[in-house]
Image: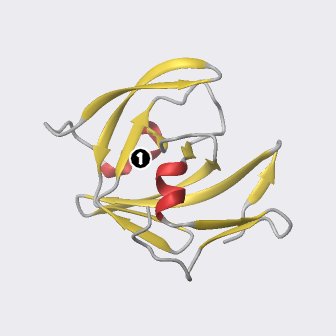
Amino acid sequence: MRLEYRDGLLFASLTIEHGGRTVTVDNVIVDTGAADTIIDIIAVEPLQLAADEDDVIVRMAGLGGFDYAVRKTVDALTFAGHTLRKPSVDFGNLVGHPGIHGLLGMDILTHGQFVLDLHAVTINPHRGLDSHRF
């Protein structure tokens, strides 16, 4: 999958499925410095996410300080041809970061054992490793 290198960051798109609905989220930063994936709640409005008793409120911390998000299990998340079933994803308010609709963190990247090629500006799941390693 080709990434877009813009403003010193790597941008991609991912798709989230939940409750029979699907949405593609663009302008997601591939962030090897983020432990967890977070998606802007406004970017996934078409999913009509509702509160669930299994949802968890989590504190997000980063260079800009901290905020809170809702950790929710969705039906599926697809990135670069790799689909995760029933991943937990954080949904929060990223309005303070215009043009950024999410951060794809190490929780998803390690699951897909992705290989990042900075020369070609691509990322792809590693097909040769044991997928149960992580």
Label 1 packing within 10 angstroms: few (<14), some (14-19), many (20+): some
**Horizontal side, residue 126 vs residue 53: left or right:** right
Q: Nearer the viewer, residue 108 or 12?
A: 108
Mark 1 element type? helix
Please give the name of the residue rendered at 47% of the width and 20% of the height, measured from the top-left corner.
Answer: 67
Please give the name of the residue rendered at 63% of the width and 20% of the height, measured from the top-left corner.
Answer: 64
Please give the name of the residue rendered at 46% of the width and 77% of the height, measured from the top-left corner.
Answer: 130
Coloration of the structure image = secondary structure
Where is residue 74, by image quadrant?
bottom left
Q: Pinpoint residue 75: horizontal percent, then vertical percent.
A: 28, 60
Location of the N terminus by quadrant is bottom right
**Horizontal side, residue 81 vs residue 52: left or right:** right
Q: Is the residue 43 above or below the residue 14 in the image?
A: above
Q: Pinpoint residue 66: horizontal percent, then vertical percent.
A: 51, 18
Question: Which amino acid type is shown beneath numbered disc 1?
Answer: Val
Please count the marks in the image.
1
Residue denoted by label 1: 44
Q: Pinpoint residue 117: horizontal percent, then vertical percent.
A: 77, 67
Q: Is the residue 109 above or below the residue 56 in the image?
A: below
Location of the C terminus by quadrant is bottom left
**Horizontal side, residue 126 vs residue 132: left or right:** right
Q: Nearer the viewer, residue 128 or 68?
A: 128
Where is residue 131, by image quadrant?
bottom left
Q: Pinpoint residue 38: horizontal percent, then vertical percent.
A: 48, 40
Query: Extreme right residue here?
Result: 119
